[in-house]
Image (cartoon, rainbow, N blue to C red):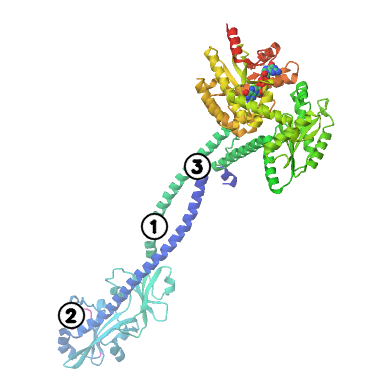
Amino acid sequence: MSAHMFRRTALTLKMLILTAALGVAVWLVSDSHHTRSLKELFHERLAERFSLEAQEHRTRFDRHVRIHTQAAKMLAGSQMMLDYLHGEPWEGRDAQSVQYHVDPPGWMPAHSVLRPFVVPRYALLLDSEGRVRELYHWDQTVPSPDLLTPSALVLALSRGQSYLTRLEAGPYLLSSEPVMLGGELVAILMLAAPIDSGFLRESQALATTPHTVALLSEGADRILVSSDPNAVPDGIRLSELSDLYLTVGKGFFDYGSSDLVIRFASFIPLQEVSDLTQAALDRAREQRIMITAAFGVTFMLLIYLLTRRVRALTQRVVEFSSHMAVKQDRTDSRDELDILEDRFKTLTSAIMRETEALEYQASHDPLTDLPNRKLLNDRLQNELLRSGFTGAPLVLMVSDLDHFKEINDTLGHHVGDLVLQQAAERLYKTVRKADTVARLGGDEFSMLFPDTTLEQGLKIARQIGRVFESPFAVEGHNLNVGISIGIAEFPAHGDDVNILMQRADVAMYAAKQNGLTYAVYDPGKDTHHVSRLELLSDLRRAIETGSLECHYQCKLDIESGRVTGAEALLRWDHPDRGMIHPDELIPLAEKTGLIRPLTNLVLRKALQECARWRESGLDLSVAVNLSAQCLREDSLLDTLRRCLDEFRLPASACVLELTESDMMADPLRAKEILMELDVIGVRISVDDFGTGYSSLAYLKQLPISEIKVDRSFVREMLEDENDLVIVRAIVDLAHNLGIRVVAEGVHSREVLDMLARLKCNEAQGYFIRKPVPGDELLTWLQSEAR
Ligand code: C2E
Ligand code: CA
Ligand code: CA
């Protein structure tokens, strides 16, 4: 199997192959090791056993030899012998010839009497001179010729003991005994036996383990005689037998006397040894095979279960990916772990990308790509901390563009955006790398200059002023866009982020009022500051006493022509200043932290009004506008739940409007809160759609039920082809995602008709109805219904 193919195989199979290969290798190594050590062990044990047996063989041989001596003693001292020697035949015999007996002669008892000793091969009766007179030979065997003429030495050496000697015919065992009569030697009895294979066999006749035994002649490595000449032939070298036999019990013969120095050996056939070993090995191997098989099966089961878990995990990753709208490509080519790794990598890198993007979006303005207010605040905070330690000066500027509102209103959003982008670029190019240029919102920019004195700051402000002198070339227009800069410095004007920002802001208003490019904060002339402070305390009181009001602008369902709901819009009838519109109020509330109580108040008033409409039989919903800051804390959810409860309204009666940029200010937090709102059942609407830069991928993940096309697109939809294209695209796109579309700022019948053709769901605008107090809207709707 090639490496490539192996990689493509499923995990279970791959593990199986690996296990099998590894198992076989380990098995082979361990088996050979095991076999070797077992064999050694067996050989040791067997050698021990065999040497015991060999010892037994030796003992038997020795006893067999000794029995000849005892037999000779018994014969020589027997009454039969004495009787015979008294008798005529012995006295009168011719001394020259030897008398041969085939049957036991008169001086020998019957075989049956002799059997407990030994039936001698040869029994010789010699006269007192040592001449052989009679010979009994068993089975007519022929004795060695020199046996018939034994020397005096031989007779002396064999007397009363076993004597091993070499005669002409080979090695012999001799054992002689004097026969005494009245204290006088009358004859000598001698038993003789050739030490041949028969003798050796007889010696081992009663052995429990009838192995081959042999005698070796001294000095030579050769077999003198063996009990089985077929197996161990005479004259063969011991070394030639090492392949066939285990030779044990080698030792010198040490009984009686001998002029032959001979050794004794037992031969155990190696076949027998290996048969015994093999049987034991086979048993051990069987056991090992069973254990290995059990292990193998268990291991495979584990692998199988593991693979299933891996697959399940992969499935979870895939599901989570699709939940996160992360595309997972098909990969069916590799094993489960690879696939899991792949999917996981895809998912994590997508999440990381998304997170990075969200983090960037959270801290940057999408239009100009500059840091936003949040990031500027963070940096200012850090720089203030650092300057607090080092005492380094710091300059903060807040600026806004002159006449920007007119440009936006007369030339449209698109041109306004381009002007903002160019302005951002000019500012960015004027400052150093260490400085920060941020867009605070609208046409407001702020610049932070660390390690900068006021003097240096003024220089930079003049330079910015010059940079803004040349007109902005946008879409064929040459636009003169001035800039007003407010300057505050640390530590002279404050050491706190909010105070420095506020004072730079005050300085900017002063610059604007006086028609200057820049102005430094002057506490003495902080009249704007004073009036804003008054307004602020008035607003705080108004919120506390609930003396703010809402006007309601209805939403018309285009297809049915019926009013389905109304949007609550904040109004403040200031005792001295008259009606103050939200465009002025909301930024002030947002900057001073009053936006939360304000929103809670509006929410309460709007839901109360909605409950009144419903009591009058009008099935309407109410929409409330939220600020970005409302998403940062939980009191919104609490207020909402409490009010819905108090006025007995279903959650579906409430719509919350949020602009794209509000959602993008802190996308992760926004997502969290919107999900919770969705769980309650409150609908979410994206306000001023088309003016922000939110990613659709992000919006897609949010539980949004409605999009409101910004009125700047709707206003000139019939005159400007571009706007019409945009509105149509938004409607199609939203419908694709299952989201309803509301058009804002509908101010004529023609626009409404066009929206109907575009299949826009709802419309809102002065043509349908201006925002009016709740009672007025109720009366109007009741009269319409009639
Ligand atoms: P918005 O949410 O886009 O509200 C619609 C604004 O467009 C309202 O201005 C409304 O009077 C105006 N409008 C409606 N139809 C037409 C039309 O046909 N032509 C034109 N030219 N204008 C039309 P309004 O009441 O001055 O509110 C301004 C903005 O202030 C609102 O814009 C909203 O973003 C914010 N706002 C109002 N009330 C609240 C509030 O309670 N809380 C918060 N956070 N913001 C609010
Ligand atoms: Ca709105
Ligand atoms: Ca709007």
Q: Amino acid at mark 1?
A: Ala
What is the span of residues highlighted in magenta in the rendered image? 96-107
> Is the distance from the Cβ of mark 3 to the nearest ligand 2 atom less than 8 Å?
no
N-terminal of the pair, mark 2 or mark 3, is 2
N-terminal of the pair, mark 3 or mark 1, is 1
N-terminal of the pair, mark 2 or mark 1, is 2
Is 697 inside the magenta-drawn segment?
Answer: no
Instruction: Residue 489: tell me if it is visible.
Output: yes
Residue underneath mark 1: 284
Q: Are marks 2 and 3 in contact (CB under 8 Å)?
A: no
Residue underneath mark 3: 307
> What's the CA distance linking mark 2 and mark 3?
93 Å
Q: Quadrant of residue 520?
A: top right
Q: Residues within 10 Å of mark 3 (few under 14, many from 20)?
A: some
Is 98 inside the magenta-drawn segment?
Answer: yes
Q: Amino acid at mark 3?
A: Thr
Looking at the rendered structure, the secondary structure element under dot 2 is loop
Q: Residues within 10 Å of mark 2 (few under 14, many from 20)?
A: some
The label number, if any, that marks residue 109 in the structure image = 2
> What's the CA distance linking mark 3 and mark 1?
34 Å
User: How far from the left and from the top, in percent, is residue 353?
Assistant: 64, 38
